[in-house]
Image: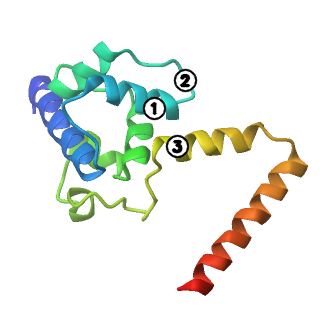
Amino acid sequence: MNSTNERESFSERLQQALKNAHYSPDSPTRLAREFNIRFEGRPITVHAARKWLVGEAIPTQEKLRMIAQWLGVPADWLRFGGADAAAANGEGADGATRFESADVKLIADLQRLDEHHKQLAREFIRMLVRIHHQQK
């Protein structure tokens, strides 16, 4: 497969993964914003996100892994395609849950706490989960 076809095929898989995760595949601004919230490295520009969406470029392996994790698809499928039925249905190979922006911000806030307060937050969340399951 030549490099133009590879970029176009990647773009199609990225757009499909975005749709499956309930994100618009038509918004490079939203893609860049959501990506940058999750990525600890150098942020991407809206122009870079647009190039990914229109098949002009493929992200680096590190960025590709972050996109795959965020969207809940296998990184190999996102980069190379294949017959992975779970990926086509928007289900991660490892069953990982996708996180929304608010969840990512909450996790980032939790990481900024000291160890004592992190433990309190974990215990509180566990208590809420137990209460929720008892109510079902």
Residue type, numbered disc 1 = Glu
Label 1 SS: helix
- Image coordinates for residue 124, horizontal then vertical, percent: 76, 64
- Left or right of 73: which side holds 20? left
Q: Which of marks 3 and 2 is in front?
A: 3
Q: Which of 124 and 39 is in front in this view?
A: 124
Sequence-wise first label, 1 or 3: 1
Q: Name the residue under label 1.
A: 62
Q: Which residue is drawn at 47% across and 27% down?
A: 36
Sequence-wise first label, 1 or 2: 2
Q: Name the residue under label 2.
A: 41
Q: Distance between the residues labelled 1 and 2?
A: 9 Å
Q: Distance between the residues labelled 1 and 3?
A: 23 Å
**Image vertical order of residue 106 relative to residue 48, above or below:** below
**Which mark is drawn over residue 102?**
3
Q: Which of 121 and 98 is in front in this view?
A: 121
Badge 3 local density, few (<14 within 10 Å), some, or many (20+)? few
- Image coordinates for residue 117, horizontal then vertical, percent: 85, 49
Cβ atoms under marks 1 and 2 closer than 8 Å: yes
Badge 2 local density, few (<14 within 10 Å), some, or many (20+)? few
Q: Which of 17 and 107 is in front in this view?
A: 107
- Left or right of 70: which side holds 41? right
Label 3 SS: helix
- Image coordinates for residue 127, horizontal then vertical, percent: 73, 72
Label 2 SS: loop
- Image coordinates for residue 45, horizontal then vertical, percent: 37, 15
